[in-house]
């Protein structure tokens, strides 16, 4: 019996060493210490051995049992520790790991400028109107009082789709659309693409952007136009920006003006960029809506008057961001666009 006990002890301790998980552990525990376990069986058979050997055998058996139990307990703790560690690893958050970042893009600088301009005019009570890029020759030229022999109507200056349809050469035809269709008074701006047969260079592109403004009401005067443009230019470029209004000619306004602002480079002191005039030329054009244009749209010019203006969005974007070549705005090079 002694040998059997020693063998059980030896085998069991060896098996305990090799236990890999809780299922193994339970299997071995039951096999040895369970009701029908090997050691339990030996202990139960104690009655069959001679009475004088019993105490010593009993003692030995109990010692072995205690030793096995102790070993098992140690193993159980070891397994539990292992499981806890695995779980902790699974549940822990690595705060140093890079989060999955989603790169968010942004509006093209030209659209940013258009939105900024629209917001400014919106805050002054203007409506934002959309107009088509494909226009009738009538809206683009005739109703805007552009004479039939005006060079801008030539096929070498304008993209014709057919005799009656063009890619609009300016945003001014939106004026016609609004005056024909909307109730008075009118206060609107409209921004978008325009097209001319220009050779591409650092300041010219066959496709560019304009913003058009129109106000039609009773008693609209040049003073209203100048005040509105001053307000807008100061809001856009700061209060220190000086403005200069020069007489000019446009077929659809009378009188017509062109507006210059202080040179962006030297702020009016005089430098190479402004040819020492202190002025940055032709930021925008405008004037009082020609009575013929009002009449063309069915508006009584003896009761109503209006002012209109148009400006180049590309030009404003370029001076705002110090961009020297218009082509950069159209190349869609992300390395360039990401800067804005
Ligand atoms: N349409 C003109 C152009 O493309 C700009 C312009 C000038 C618009 C005077 C206007 C205006 O509304 O009144 O050069």
Image (tube, grey):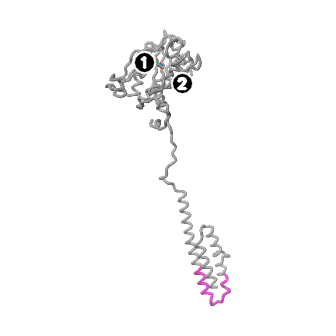
Frontmost residue, 231 versus 130: 130
Q: Which residues are magenta?
A: 44-64
Above or below, 15 relative to 118: below
The response on whether ligand 1 sits within 8 Å of label 1 is no
Frontmost residue, 157 versus 63: 157
Marking on residue 225: 1
Label 1 SS: helix
Observer able to see residue 183: no
Q: Is residue 254 left or right of residue 279?
A: right
Answer whether residue 191 is magenta in the image: no
The response on whether ligand 1 sits within 8 Å of label 2 is no
CA neighbours of label 2 inside 10 A, class few (<14), some (14 to 19), many (20+) = few
Residue under label 2:
130
Label 2 SS: loop
Marking on residue 54: none
First of labels 2, 1 by sequence position: 2
Residue 1 lies in what quarter of the image?
Answer: bottom right
């Amino acid at each position: 019996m002694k040998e059997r006990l020693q063998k059980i002890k030896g085998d069991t301790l060896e098996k305990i060493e090799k236990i890999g998980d809780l299922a193994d552990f339970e299997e071995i525990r039951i096999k040895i210490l369970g009701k029908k376990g090997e050691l339990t069986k030996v202990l139960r058979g104690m009655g069959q051995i001679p009475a004088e050997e019993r105490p010593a055998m009993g003692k030995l058996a109990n010692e072995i049992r205690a030793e096995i139990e102790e070993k098992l307990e140690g193993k159980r703790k070891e397994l539990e520790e292992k499981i806890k560690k695995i779980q902790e690893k699974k549940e822990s958050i690595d705060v140093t790991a890079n989060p999955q970042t989603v790169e968010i893009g942004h509006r093209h600088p030209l659209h940013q400028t258009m939105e900024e301009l629209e917001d400014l005019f919106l805050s002054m009570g203007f409506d934002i109107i959309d107009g088509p890029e494909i226009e009738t020759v009538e809206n683009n030229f005739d109703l805007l009082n552009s004479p039939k022999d005006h060079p801008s109507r030539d096929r070498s200056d304008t993209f014709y789709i057919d005799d009656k349809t063009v890619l609009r050469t300016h945003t001014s035809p939106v004026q016609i659309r609004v005056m024909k269709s909307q109730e008075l008074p009118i206060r609107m701006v409209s921004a978008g693409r325009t097209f001319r047969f220009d050779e591409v260079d650092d300041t010219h592109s066959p496709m560019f952007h304009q913003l058009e403004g129109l106000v039609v009401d009773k008693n609209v005067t040049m003073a209203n136009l100048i005040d509105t443009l001053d307000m807008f230019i100061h809001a856009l470029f700061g209060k220190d920006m000086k403005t200069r209004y020069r007489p000019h000619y446009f077929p659809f306004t009378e009188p017509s003006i062109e507006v210059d602002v202080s040179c962006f480079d030297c702020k009016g002191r005089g430098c190479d960029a402004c040819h020492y005039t202190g002025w940055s030329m032709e930021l925008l054009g405008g004037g009082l809506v020609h009575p013929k244009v009002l009449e063309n749209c069915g508006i009584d010019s003896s009761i109503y008057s209006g002012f209109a203006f148009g400006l180049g969005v590309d030009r404003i974007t370029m001076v705002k961001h110090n961009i020297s070549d218009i082509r950069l705005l159209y190349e869609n090079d992300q390395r360039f666009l990401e800067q804005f």
